[in-house]
Image (cartoon, rainbow, N blue to C red):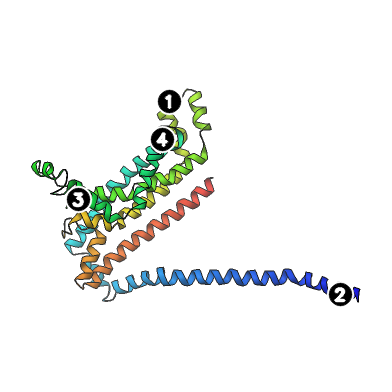
Amino acid sequence: MAAGAQSASLDDVSTRPGRDTIVSSIVRWTFISLSLLFLAALLFAPLATVFVMAFEKGWRAYVHSFADPDTAAAIRLTLITALVVVPLNTVFGLAASWAIAKFEFRGKSFLITLIDLPLAISPVISGMVYVLLFGLHGWFGVWLQEHDISVIFALPGIILATMFVTFPYVARELIPLMQQLGNDEEEAAITLGAGGWITFFRVTLPKVRWGLVYGVILCNARAMGEFGAVSVVSGHIRGLTNTMPLHIEILYNEYNFVGAFAVASLLTLLAVATLVVKTLVERTGYRRR
């Protein structure tokens, strides 16, 4: 009897790893299936709908949608805004991350809080702040009007609002990376006689270049797709202050579905291109590391 019981217990032990493997496999594929269903419902289906609606009336109607002067102006304004905002935020992100990661100074925690502020508040609120400052009845509105300077309902206001909501991306990508890399190489370069700027461009910047590119890509994607803050400060002037997201809303409200989804498809393609570049940068960075 004892030998039989011992044999049965050994059989249970020998079959348990197989059962555990089957159970873990079932659990793994269950979560994978749920994730794919979630992505299909919330990501792939809406994207497919955008392109189906854009080409609903054929290629000619799709291409003709971009011949509209207002559409061309919206595309041009979006690209100009991104071309101005991204380099400025890149310079700020580099300077802020270098100061925070490499030095100790008073107000460091406050600076980090300010960098995180746009991520914590609604973009609409940030747009309202600029209206309060530079609007006709704002703090500087009378002075701006006397000097014939337009900020709100003009390109400067759109650039300022977009800068506000996008400036954390480069800094937030570089700060933990610089802190992780430490200061040993910089201190060695300074000991050997290198100045601050040479140390930055020859030692610090090459080490964080892939993180910098990654932050620039995220900043550019958000700049082109920003809606809330730009909607408040733009005034929705067709052909002048409408970016691509705002122009899509106007076309849709006018029941011009082909035009709206055509512009949306272009914005989607720009986003997909951004994701492709992001993936390539990540892979290249991991290989270099």
- Secondary structure at numbered mark 4: helix
Q: Residue at x 23, y 61 (%)?
A: 246
Q: Earlier in the sequence, mark 2 or mark 4?
A: 2
Tell me if I can see residue 189 in this picture.
Answer: yes
Q: Considering only vertical position in the picture, is 288 above or below 47?
A: above
Q: Earlier in the sequence, mark 3 or mark 4?
A: 4
As drawn, is 189 to the left or to the right of 112? Answer: right
Q: Amino acid at mark 2?
A: Ala
Q: Considering only vertical position in the picture, is 229 above or below 99?
A: below
The residue wearing badge 2 is: 5
Q: Earlier in the sequence, mark 2 or mark 3?
A: 2
Query: Badge 1, how many Cα within 10 Å: few under 14, some, many 20+?
Result: few
Q: Considering only vertical position in the picture, is 189 above or below 149?
A: above
Q: Nearer the viewer, mark 2 or mark 1?
A: 2
Could you give the CA–CA distance between mark 1 and mark 3, rounded to whole angstroms?
43 Å
Q: Nearer the viewer, mark 4 or mark 1?
A: 4
Could you give the CA–CA distance between mark 2 and mark 4, rounded to whole angstroms?
70 Å
Q: Residue at x 65, y 71 (%)?
A: 23
Disc 1 to disc 3: CB gap under 8 Å: no
The residue wearing badge 3 is: 131
